Amino acid sequence: MDIIKNKVAESGIITLDLSTMMMEDTIVAEFDLKPFLFREMILKEKDYRASLQTHDWEQYKNKTVAIFCSVDAIIPVWAYMLAASYLQPLAKTTYFGTKQEMIKYFLLKCIEEINTMDYEDKRVVIKGCGDIQIPDAAYVAVTNKLRPVVKSLMYGEPCSTVPIYKKSITKQEG
């Protein structure tokens, strides 16, 4: 009787799934300045301040909030600051930019915090396909982070990878 071997499991390949670094425990909310603009074009300070005072801020409690404006309007910097000042006591954290920009920022921050010693001289596959869209910038960042320490770096799934980098073995002359 032939024994079926799992060559992938025996290969010692480490799979790094970037989607596990996504903001799993964080509920993301958006604060768009568009509804606070006159004709979706002009921010009137007096009206804006009055609207912020009556706005339901509790909806942002313990959430990570992206502050942005979804229309092409000239928004003074203080308008974003004022929104942030209302959010600060309730929100878990705030970020200036869209939800997608915020997710990218936090993912890149997580990649920067990777302990490269965990991957030293290892064969690493960066998981490619999944249900969660990973920003392309994350793949570049993880390549830059791991290339100096890994034995090899691949993209895809352990059973079907695209080689990205393989450390060459050089003989030392003496």
Image: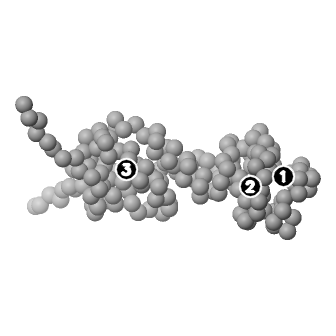
Q: CA distance from mark 3 to mark 1?
A: 43 Å
Q: Amino acid at mark 1?
A: Asp
Name the quadrant containing residue 128.
bottom left
Which residue in the structure is indicated by mark 3? 143
Q: Amino acid at mark 3?
A: Thr
Residue at 34% over, 35% down? 117
Specify whether residue 82 is in view: yes
Which residue in the structure is indicated by mark 1? 56
Outermost residue, top side: 174
Which residue in the structure is indicated by mark 2? 31
Q: Is residue 103 left or right of residue 125?
A: right
Image position of 159 with respect to 105: above or below: below
10 Å crowding of disc 3: few (<14), some (14-19), many (20+)? some
Residue at 71% over, 56% down? 68
Q: Secondary structure at mark 1?
A: loop
Residue 29 x, y percent position in the rendering:
69, 54
Residue 57 x, y percent position in the rendering:
81, 49
Q: Are marks 3 and 1 in contact (CB under 8 Å)?
A: no
Q: Amino acid at mark 2?
A: Phe
Q: CA distance from mark 1 to mark 2?
A: 11 Å
Mark 3 vs mark 1: give the one in front: 3
Mark 3 vs mark 2: give the one in front: 3
Specify which label sits upstream in the sequence, 3 or 2.
Answer: 2
Quadrant of the snapshot with the N terminus:
bottom left
10 Å crowding of disc 2: few (<14), some (14-19), many (20+)? many
Residue at 44% over, 62% down? 130
